[in-house]
Amino acid sequence: MIDLQGRIASHHPVYPGILARKQLEISAIPSKDNCNGKPLKLKLHGMYRITIKHGKEKQLLRHHPWVFTGAIDRTEPEFSKEDWAEVYTDKGEFIAHGWYDEKSHIVLHLLSWNRKESVDEKWVATKVREAVLRRREFLSRESNTNACRIIHGEADFLPGIAADVYSSAIRVVISSRFANTFTPVIAETLDNMLHPDVIIFNADPQYASSEGISSKPRYFKNGVETKLDEAELEPVTILENGIYYEVPLTKGQKSGFYCDQRDNRVLVSKYAEGRTCLDVCSYTGAFTMHMLKEGARSVKSIDASESALRHLLYQVHLNENRGTLPEGTREKVEILSGDCFEEMRRTEEGKYDLIVLDPPKLAKTKGKLENAMKAYKDLNRVAMMKIQPNGIIATFSCSGAMTREDFRMMLSWAAKDAGVEVQVLESLGAGSDHPIRLSFPESEYLKGYIIRVIK
């Protein structure tokens, strides 16, 4: 059921004086036996039996879902096309059900460790349903937002699927061939439960080529794939913690808006009152908006994307007109388009007493972690040197390959090289709609700290 309070926020630069709110709510709970009304009609030839090499089974028995080629001893029958699989140790002991596809960069995704469970497209629909139901508190009229993550990949047992609700629309980013195969099941199940205006599927550009997934968007209305002109998809306006944001449905980084930082924006902004703030890698300014709302003296926002910065300024005007930001807030904001690392080096020393560092993913794989650690350290070292004595830095990493321990070690190295002492004030992570699955540590991709720099 949709909270029908009218369509909200045009993207036209004439800023609307009245904004309403649309909210997707769970309107029906399909039974486990009828989660998916229309079968995919997949032409699957039969289940594979896969044997894992001796010694490679340990983390799989601990329910880690990824299996790479080097861990597989043999496959019966030989691979011909993607299909379900039963996975065994070299001693013939059952490990898990999975999905096997040699054309994927992760050739085997483990899905269920319950041997008695039937794993098929109904299983996929059930997992989608269960993921949505776990977000009940976000999908109610009492929620402080109408934007949230409803499927969080392997943390919800659905590899390569990240689905976000934005007002009356759902945007899904897929990063696996598994997700691409079951896109119709995912779309139909989400539509049955939430009845969005549209569901948009985009391939993650980081994985589209390696997975052989088309980069062309796919659109679903009423659970059925349809053709749409991008011009038909106007941006939607979302509400988060009393601030309005306009989110494009066809463009933007990843899914269009970073819901994972929702709680952190509130925690960081409580330090903003009366401070001169610097928002590095600001994108469209969600941290900027929160700091302004909480009384920052000024905010300078730096990002590589000039269009993102222009959108940031539009959103300031949007909230001034709505009354969620005080009149005259625009005069407190300065934007700068450029390389965030280089601009940090050019920053005047001692000017800022609150700095936010939220760079893009620098370690996309474990093989790139060493170089990424150097880049993270350099950025944080420079920030520590530039900030005022006793200034506050909110620093983040969204690299799943970097552990929280790696991140803290990097900060200690940066502090040593900057010649400062650092106090950790708060430890940060993604919101509860982005849960961490303990058997899959990579799901703790976002980590951050609020620190005080003592000189």
Image (cartoon, grey):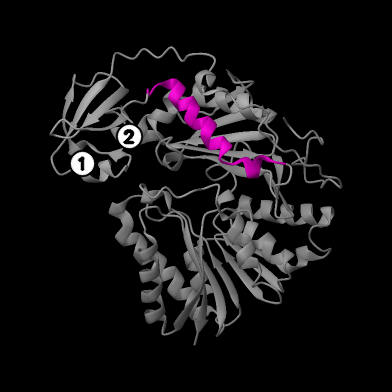
Q: Position of residue 18 (x, y in %)?
A: 86, 45
Residue farthest front in this picture: 116
- The secondary structure that dominates the magenta segment is helix
Which residue in the structure is indicated by mark 1?
57
Tell me the amino acid under the disc marked 1. Glu
Please tell me whether mark 2 sits on a helix, a strand or a loop.
loop
Query: With respect to residue 46, does 58 lie above or below?
Result: below
Real-space CA distance between mark 2 and mark 1, rounded to the nearest whole angstrom: 13 Å
Query: With respect to residue 19, does 211 lie above or below?
Result: above
Name the residue nearer the viewer: 396 or 12. 396
Write down the region rendered in magenta.
118-140
- Could you tell me which residue is drawn at 65 percent across and 26 percent down? 28
Say if the magenta span includes residue 157: no
- Could you tell me which residue is drawn at 44 percent across and 43 percent down? 155
| Mark carried by residue 113 | 2
Q: In the rendered image, which quarter contains the N terminus?
A: top right
